[in-house]
């Protein structure tokens, strides 16, 4: 006869064995796996699917240009909660091109624009030019623990002339611009008044110590022979001609060179326009020649390639047989370079930056012809050179 204690121990052992069989059975394993998968996939789906619906309203994708409206963000916020306009959120925008544009219609809240020069992460100098009808927002550039005001929406037209550049250097391979709306609707102003905070930007890599490339907006010096030959092949415009006037604009912080080109060798855009010759058939009358400079400012020149005797260039140096093909254009040079008149004919080369024709190199025609002949003789020309 079995002891009651022994019988009780056997029953407990059998119950434990049955419990182990249930745990090891396929049905029980399937139940556990389904539950664990459910716990695993729910947050995973939330991480990958939800951003597809959330990101477009929060941040703009990488690109060159961005166009948006403050009314879109305002309507989305008003559906969730009522907030005063001074507490609108900040919309981030990320751009990774060397040049582009930003257009913010009906500015509301704030916009943070991050500029990068591609994915290289290199340091660069950035410049932006506000549109002629820029309004509705203040624009700042983020510096170390502070914001530097570049333009105020309340500035008068005199303090913000068309074409003025605002330049800054990158920090750790990027520049962050902060645009803050001017709070329309406050003080009785029309909240739906059409205003646009728009600007163009241009980024140029900062030269390294072993980089010999030449950027006239960062340094003032004449181009070398090699730089001139390379610029001829890569420039946006090349033309032969004379300097007809020099004007220093303190507000724009640049010098404007009025050039009358006798031959346009190449131009990617309309830098040089044909001269209107209708006045040639009219009766002669006493008037100032169009070649007479409007304003001569005798200042020393750091651009030795353009040095010369200051004089009124009334066209005496020009060949009248070339006047039928003559074009005129305005070239931009930094004011710090202190350019003045130079006599003789030059070869003007440069690039378009922010819509302006920036002069890069300007060797004298005689020197350029010698360089071209030498490059063609020794075979060092990188493209077909012309004089």
Image (tube, rainbow, N blue to C red):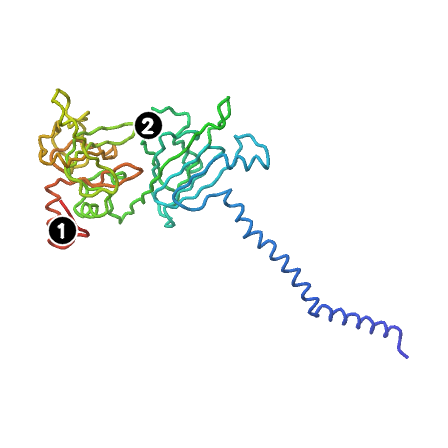
- Residue 281 in which image quadrant: top left
Q: Quadrant of the N terminus?
A: bottom right
List the residue tagged with mark 1. Answer: 375
Measured in 3D between alpha carbons, the distance from the residue under mark 2 to the one under mark 1, in whole angstroms, is 44 Å
Picture mark count: 2
State the image coordinates of residue 375 (x, y, percent, origin top left): 13, 51
**Quarter the C terminus occupies:** top left
Q: Position of residue 187 (x, y in %)?
A: 50, 22
Q: Residue furthest right?
A: 1
Question: Mark 2 packing: few (<14 Cα in 10 Å), some, or many (20+)?
Answer: some
Return the residue nearer the eye: 344 or 338.
344
State the residue in front, 202 or 176.
202
Q: Secondary structure at mark 2?
A: loop
Q: Give the residue displayed 57% in from the left and 32% down from the top.
A: 83
Q: Residues within 10 Å of mark 1 (few under 14, many from 20)?
A: some
The residue lying furthest to the front in this view is: 281
* Mark closest to the chain's N terminus, 2 or 1: 2
Element on which disc 1 rests: helix
Q: Position of residue 55 (x, y in %)?
A: 51, 46
Please indicate whether residue 159 sits to the left or right of residue 29 in the image: left
Q: Which sits in the foreground, 306 or 73?
A: 73
Seen at 35% across and 27% down, the residue is 160
Residue under label 2, please give it.
161
Tell whether label 1 touches label 2 (CB within 8 Å): no
Residue situated furthest bottom in the rendering: 1
Q: Is residue 101 above or below residue 312?
A: below
Residue at point 46%, 43% (across, down):
60
| Residue 253 location (% of width, % of height) | 28, 30
């Amino acid at each position: 006869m079995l002891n009651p204690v022994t019988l009780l121990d056997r029953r407990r052992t059998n119950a434990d064995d049955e419990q182990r069989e249930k745990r090891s059975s396929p049905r029980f394993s399937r139940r556990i796996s389904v539950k664990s998968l459910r716990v695993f996939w729910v947050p995973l789906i939330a991480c990958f699917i939800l951003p597809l619906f959330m990101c477009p309203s929060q941040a703009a994708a990488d690109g060159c240009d961005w166009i948006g409206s403050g009314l879109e963000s305002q309507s989305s916020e008003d559906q969730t909660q009522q907030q005063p306009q001074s507490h609108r959120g900040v919309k981030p925008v990320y751009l990774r091109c060397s040049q582009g544009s930003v257009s913010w219609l009906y500015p509301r809240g704030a916009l943070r624009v991050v500029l990068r020069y591609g994915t290289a992460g290199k340091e660069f100098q950035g410049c932006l030019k506000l549109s002629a009808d820029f309004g509705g927002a203040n624009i700042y550039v983020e510096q170390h623990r502070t914001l530097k005001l570049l333009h105020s929406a309340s500035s008068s037209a005199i303090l913000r002339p068309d074409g003025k550049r605002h330049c800054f250097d990158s920090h750790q391979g990027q520049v962050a611009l902060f645009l803050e709306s001017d709070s329309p609707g406050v003080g009785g102003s029309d909240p739906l008044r059409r205003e646009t905070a728009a600007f163009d930007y241009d980024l140029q890599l900062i030269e390294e110590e072993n980089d010999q490339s030449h950027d006239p907006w960062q340094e003032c010096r004449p181009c070398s022979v090699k730089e001139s030959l390379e610029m001829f092949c890569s420039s946006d415009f090349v033309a032969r001609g004379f300097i007809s006037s020099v004007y220093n604009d303190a507000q724009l912080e640049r010098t404007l060179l009025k050039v009358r080109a006798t031959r346009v060798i190449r131009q990617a855009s309309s830098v040089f326009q044909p001269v209107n010759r209708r006045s040639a058939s009219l009766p002669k009358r006493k008037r100032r020649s169009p070649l007479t400079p409007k304003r001569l400012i005798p200042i020393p020149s750091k651009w030795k390639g353009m040095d010369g005797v200051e004089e009124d260039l009334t066209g005496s140096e020009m060949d009248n047989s070339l006047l039928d093909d003559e074009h005129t254009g305005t070239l931009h040079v930094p004011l710090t370079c202190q350019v003045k008149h130079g006599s003789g004919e030059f070869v003007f080369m440069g690039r378009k930056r922010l819509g302006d024709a920036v002069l890069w190199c300007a060797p004298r025609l005689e020197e350029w012809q010698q360089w071209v002949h030498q490059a063609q003789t020794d075979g060092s020309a990188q493209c077909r050179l012309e004089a």
